[in-house]
Image (cartoon, helix red, strand yellow):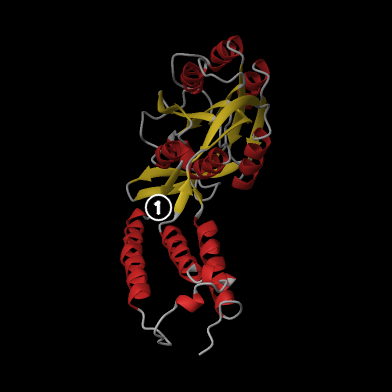
Amino acid sequence: MMIFANPAYLWLLLLLIPLVAWYILKQHKSDASIEVSTTIPFDKLSRSYKYYLRHLRFVLRMCALTALIIALARPQSTNSWSNRTTEGIDIVVALDISTSMLARDFKPNRVDAAKDVAAQFISGRTYDNIGLVIFAGESFTMCPMTTDHSALLNLLKDVECGMIEDRTAIGDGLATAINRIKDGPAKSKTIILLTDGTNNAGDIAPVTAADIAKTFGIRVYTIGVGTQGMAPYPVQTPYGIQYQNYPVEIDENTLKEIASKTDGEYFRATDKNALKDIFSEIDKLEKTKLSVTEYSKREERFMVWAILAMLLLCADILLKNTILKNIP
């Protein structure tokens, strides 16, 4: 199927009608170069090839003009369907947004660093079905599973600490992520859980949630976010928010157990670069082959018509200066 990006230019083809009419009238009304009383003696003379080609240059010019107008209208092909096999998995990112994620051991802080790295990870997973769960003292789905990564990234930008009740409910966050991913279409299902603390809220124990994930064949990769030792945490004071150093406390044993139970892996991210490396490692997960039908919306075809117009004009110029050259 052929369509035109600028179909209005096709109206210029109507110019061919008056041009052809003008040429015909010109042939009938042209003045003779030599006037004689009769042409009967010339009727028996054989006609040269020039006689039969005398209108060829005009035809070439009209064809060149037609091709040029079509090129200006920008013809495009819209019939390029293709079936190919690609790779993709189901992924849910479960992000801790408790106020401790505002600590400044990451630049600018833990939650913003995690959002930046997660956004880069999502952008690189073109065919994956990805969702986003956030948790603190409770959990909820920020974005359900989707392949519309633009919408997902926009929602990720809106994530902020303080959106929900504070504290850290790792088990509830993991359970919500499981509920979202368990019915996904891909064979490989993965949850990436990022937290910087210990489980101190919620109704579901983290290890219990891990057992549920194992039942559904979901692999959980856990990431402990925080430097070693002390980190500057935001503290509300009568003079506003100030940062004071507190020890970093991450329940690594629980996170390791969650990863171990689900055939995943535990990572410790002590800075933003380490977090990038962790997501790069997770990017190498097992992938599932998917059959994808792709439709190429448009392919430009104007260049063929532009080249044709140029060739026709070159042929006209060549004939004018060689076999159809007029001698005054």
Q: Is residue 183 above or below residue 312?
A: above
| Residue sitting nearer the eye, 328 or 304 | 328
Q: Which of the pair 277/57 is nearer the observer?
A: 57
**Image spot of residue 302 (x, y percent):** 49, 57
- The amino acid type found where label 1 is placed reads Ala
The residue at the point 51 percent across, 30 percent down is 130
Residue with the mark numbered 1: 5
Eyeballing the image, is 207 above or below 310?
above
Nearer the observer, 6 or 130: 6
**Compared with residue 29, is residue 148 higher up or lower down, i.e. above or below?**
above
The answer to whether residue 251 is seen in the rendering is no
How far across and how far down the image is residue 258, in percent? Answer: 62, 19
Quarter of the figure with residue 237? top left
Point 37% across, 71% down: residue: 23
Q: Is residue 177 above or below residue 60?
A: above
Q: Please give left or right for residue 26 compared with residue 113 in the image.
A: left
**Picture coordinates of residue 223 (x, y %)?**
60, 32
Image-quadrant location for residue 282 = top right
Secondary structure beneath dot 1 equals loop
